[in-house]
Amino acid sequence: MDLENQQRVKDLTEKHGAENIVVLLGAAEAEAAGLAAETVTAGDPTFAGPLAGVELGLRVYHAVEPQFKGEVDESVYEEQIGMMEMVLEVDEIIEEMKNIREEFCKFND
């Protein structure tokens, strides 16, 4: 997650409260999604950005996870994300996100 987006997440969390924020990711690889998820939950693990040492504990999901998929219009999901499900390692992404939430998220599903 780039420094600008880290600052946006931090600012929005300060303004609206962590309990009112949900982060949706769309990274193509489980490792990248996990790094971004860790950043918005436990703080920037690279210690380079505005979230370095800042544990927000935000709810975080990936666009291919059932929790998100079940909340959006099926035709819109298929049009926007459906094709990507065929090329992404969906099971790996789901497992990585689940692990991050279990370890770092203050607001459970």
Image: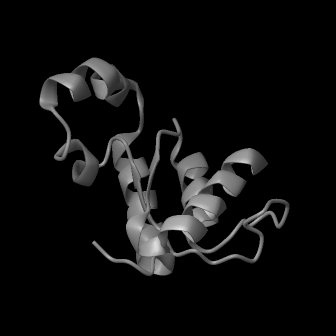
Identify the image quadrant of residue 37. Answer: bottom right
Residue in the picture at 52% in, 75% down: 57
Q: Check the picture and name the quadrant holding the C terminus.
A: bottom left
Residue in the picture at 65% in, 52% down: 8
Judged from this view, the residue extending furthest toward the front is 15
Residue in the picture at 37% in, 25% down: 84
Q: Is residue 2 visible?
A: no
Identify the image quadrant of residue 14. Answer: bottom right
Q: Left of 40 or right of it: where is 79?
A: left
Q: Is residue 22 visible?
A: yes
Residue 27, given in percent of the width and then of the height, sits at 53, 39
In depth, the one of 11 and 85 nearer the eye is: 11
Residue 25, given in percent of the width and then of the height, sits at 48, 46
Residue in the picture at 51% in, 35% down: 28
105 lies above or below 93: below
Identify the image quadrant of residue 7. Answer: bottom right
Q: Left of 95 or right of it: where is 31?
A: right
Q: How is the image coloured?
A: one colour
In depth, the one of 29 and 46 nearer the eye is: 46
79 lies above or below 27: above
Residue 86, given in percent of the width and then of the height, sits at 32, 25
The image shows a total of numbered marks equal to 0
